[in-house]
Image (cartoon, rainbow, N blue to C red):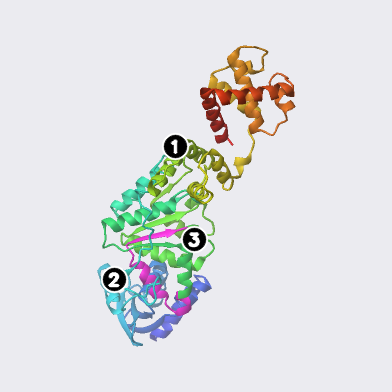
Amino acid sequence: MNKDYTTIWSNCLKIIKDNISLQSYKTWFEPITPVKLEKNVLTIQVPSQFFYEWLEEHYVTLLRKTIIRELGKEARLEYRIVMEQSNSKNATTINVPNQNSGNNKNQDVNAMSVLGGSVKNPFIIPGLKKINVDPQLVSGYTFDTFVEGDCNRLARSAGFAVAQKPGGTSFNPLVLYSQIGLGKTHLAHAIGNQIKSQFPAKTVLYVQIEKFANQFIDAMKNGHINDFIHFYQLIDVLIIDDIQFLAGKPKIQEIFFTIFNHLHQNAKQLILTSDRPVKDLQDMDERLLSRFKWGLSADLQVPDFETRIAILEKKMYADGIELPRDVVEFVAYNINTNIRELEGALTSLLAQSVLNKKEIDIELAKKIVKNFVKSVTREVSIEFIQKAVCDYYSIPFEKLREKTRKRHIVQARQLSMFLAKNFTKNSLKAIGKHFGGRDHSTVIHSCQAVQNMIDTDNQFKEDVVELEKKISMSL
């Protein structure tokens, strides 16, 4: 006895339900309606083009085996896709054969674009056409304003290569990762701005993953999921910031997986940023992680001293200002973990100078830097000061503790005591013990002798300023 198409599909669903999770079954199979059965071809109706593509991507093997079990080896499955018109309640259907029909599939995707009307843009309501998508890029974040150093050379080079040939390199996706404030967002924007400059016709979009998630939630509430997905599938260069926030959001991961696959398969460029390497991302779908690893992961490390100086100098040049070299070095030396804090300290320094009408010097820099780096308040040791003075004057360290009256050694010892008094919280007696057991009166005399020389000897004064700068940089 021949079975009708509803019975056939009902039997298929029983098998499918036993092989996938209940949530997946409810999401992807309950909305399907059987339409007809002609010979060995079963036609089913799905709600959208996206629905069809998802089934083909994830469940085609299961569907094929199930249909063959019910209808025999010659069985085939065809889809009828409902295309809702934007200004009409009517639906249009297009038939898509299952598997082995790549050309037809491409034609149907094009047909979807024509039949489906305009796609809603989640960035602007109501929706705008693709050509009107605002890239959401910061214009000031360019390759010209990005300071290159050993800490970021690989990431910068890879980013520039992507900008020259988006979607056409092996760096797809390009994953930029680093701790906070080391320039990965700047570099991501720089790539986007360069592409927009060289390829004006390409649609570039930067979006933080949290905004992406909020758009998805809004689309679910308003029944615009298909529009949401179709919008992102139209993008030529998609820049997603902070992908680590996808963790623990399986529904959003599923949607992003679909968008990622579509863009990658169509040679569209994906640029992702993260605060950690892909291998360290937690609570993430393994399929998504594997795709993140398809391209190149490049880290941006903490900039070295020279690079930090260059960053400050570039910002000063851009703002049309000049600062004393020793102040720039002091800021660069003490703020060594975060570029945002480095630039923030420079801005605060300028603001304090203007508002309080103070000259920008090391003392003002110390006060500003204290607000950014706790470690600036730590104390250097007397031994460190002694070594700094000995290195500066090329004197053996042990000579400072000897009972010698050689002028250059006495002067170095006195200066070491003077600096120890100014840079440490040690008592005069404690300082004296570090210089061969001398008493506090010797320390007082030494400090007064140094102050007298500072007031009368310009060369000695310059030596003291230089040593103070070196010690300050170690704080």
- Residue 117, image quadrant: bottom left
What residue do we see at 35% from left, 72% from top? Answer: 73
> Could you give the CA–CA distance between mark 2 and mark 3, rounded to whole angstroms?
28 Å
Q: Nearer the viewer, residue 47 or 339?
A: 339
In this figure, which residue is indicated by the disc labeled 2?
A: 105
> Is 224 situated left or right of 336 in this image?
left
Q: CB of mark 2 within 8 Å of CB of mark 1?
A: no
Tell me, for residue 306, which label it has, or none. Answer: 1
In the rendered image, the vertical position of residue 188 relative to residue 123, given as above or below: above
Q: Helix or strand or loop: what does disc 3 sit on?
A: loop
In this figure, which residue is indicated by the disc labeled 3?
A: 285
**Mark nearer the N terminus (1 vs 3):** 3
- Residue 107, image quadrant: bottom left
Q: Helix or strand or loop: what does disc 1 sit on?
A: helix
> Could you give the CA–CA distance between mark 2 and mark 1, rounded to whole angstroms?
55 Å
Q: Helix or strand or loop: what does disc 2 sit on?
A: helix
* The N terminus: image quadrant: bottom left
In the rendered image, the vertical position of residue 404 relative to residue 116, given as above or below: above
Q: Nearer the viewer, residue 42 or 261?
A: 261
Q: Is residue 167 magenta?
A: no
- Percent position (x, y) of residue 415? 61, 23
**Mark nearer the N terminus (2 vs 3):** 2
- Residue 425, image quadrant: top right
* Span shown in magenta: 219-242
Amino acid at the residue labelled 3: Asp
Q: Is residue 385 visible?
A: yes
What residue do we see at 33% from left, 85% from top? Answer: 87
